[in-house]
């Protein structure tokens, strides 16, 4: 068995991907040194697994199925823009994600973390901040232009995602960017 890099995530529709690509085009006009995420690869990470042994996948799948067994499909709202750690010192440019008042997303994410920690995976540190990463800042070049561009779209509304499945996704880092392959699909 070999080692693979993987994460657990939620995919976004092509409609949302297209809208995010439009947002990226606006932000690219700032001419900042940002590595923009291929819109096809934009996803919501629930848990980063890191390097795992392929033999662990069936156990991970079992825990995922248990984690989502009590949750029906639900909707997420995609909107507002920001940066980590903050807008003054941006390293990651993101679009926010929130769910309905039932907090299905946070419930699932916490349950996945709890169940995977029993398998030896480290739980995510700090508060879960659901987001879609659209770019990674590589240098301070034209940072002020980038900040103005992000501030101009802070309250942007993108749309909704229907969450009806959660995936274990293999991530292969290539010179052209990450390449993702679905390993497991767990439907809600």
Image (cartoon, rainbow, N blue to C red):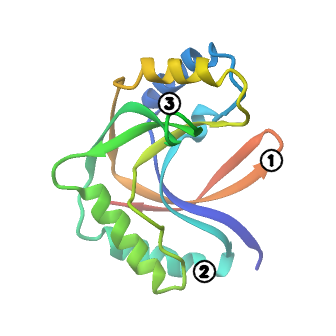
Q: Residues within 10 Å of mark 2 (few under 14, many from 20)?
A: few
Quadrant into which the N terminus falls: bottom right
Q: Which image quadrant is residue 25 in? A: top right
Give coordinates of residue 171: x percent, y percent: 67, 56
Give coordinates of residue 44: x percent, y percent: 46, 48
Q: Residues within 10 Å of mark 3 (few under 14, many from 20)?
A: many
The disc, 2 or 3, on the residue closer to the chain's N-terminal end is 3
For disc 2, the marked residue is: 56
Residues at marks 2 and 3, CA–CA distance in whole angstroms? 31 Å
The disc, 1 or 3, on the residue closer to the chain's N-terminal end is 3
In the rendered image, the residue lying farthest to the right is 175
- Mark 3 lies on a secondary structure that is helix
Q: Residue at x 43, y 58 (%)?
A: 166
Q: Are marks 2 and 1 in contact (CB under 8 Å)?
A: no
For disc 1, the marked residue is: 174
- Mark 2 lies on a secondary structure that is helix
Q: Residue at x 50, y 30 (%)?
A: 17
Q: Which image quadrant is residue 68 in? A: bottom left
**Residue 17: numbered disc:** 3
Position above or below: 40 against 102: above
Q: Residue at x 70, y 47 (%)?
A: 179
The disc, 2 or 1, on the residue closer to the chain's N-terminal end is 2
**Residue 106: numbered disc:** none
Residue 23 visible within the image: no
Position above or below: 118 against 28: below
Give coordinates of residue 38: x percent, y percent: 64, 34
Position above or below: 165 against 118: above
- Mark 1 lies on a secondary structure that is strand
> Viewed as shown, does residue 87 lie left or right of 53?
left
Residues at marks 2 and 1, CA–CA distance in whole angstroms? 24 Å
Position above or below: 45 against 29: below
């Amino acid at each position: 068995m070999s080692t693979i890099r993987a994460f657990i995530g939620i995919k976004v529709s092509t409609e949302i991907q297209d809208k995010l690509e439009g947002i990226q085009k606006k932000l690219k006009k700032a001419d900042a040194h940002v590595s923009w995420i291929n819109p096809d690869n934009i996803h919501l990470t629930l848990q980063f697994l890191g390097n795992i042994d392929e033999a662990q996948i069936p156990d991970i799948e079992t825990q995922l199925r248990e984690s989502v067994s009590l949750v029906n499909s639900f909707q997420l709202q995609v909107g507002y823009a920001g940066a980590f750690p903050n807008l003054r010192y941006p390293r990651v440019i993101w679009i926010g994600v929130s769910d309905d008042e039932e907090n299905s997303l946070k419930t699932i994410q916490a349950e996945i973390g709890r169940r995977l920690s029993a398998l030896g995976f480290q739980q995510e540190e700090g508060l879960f901040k659901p987001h879609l990463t659209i770019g990674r800042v590589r240098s301070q070049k034209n940072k002020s232009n980038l900040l103005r561009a992000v501030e101009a779209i802070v309250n942007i509304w993108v749309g909704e995602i229907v969450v009806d499945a959660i995936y274990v996704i293999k991530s292969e880092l290539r010179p052209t960017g990450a390449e993702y392959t679905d390993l497991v699909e767990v439907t809600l």
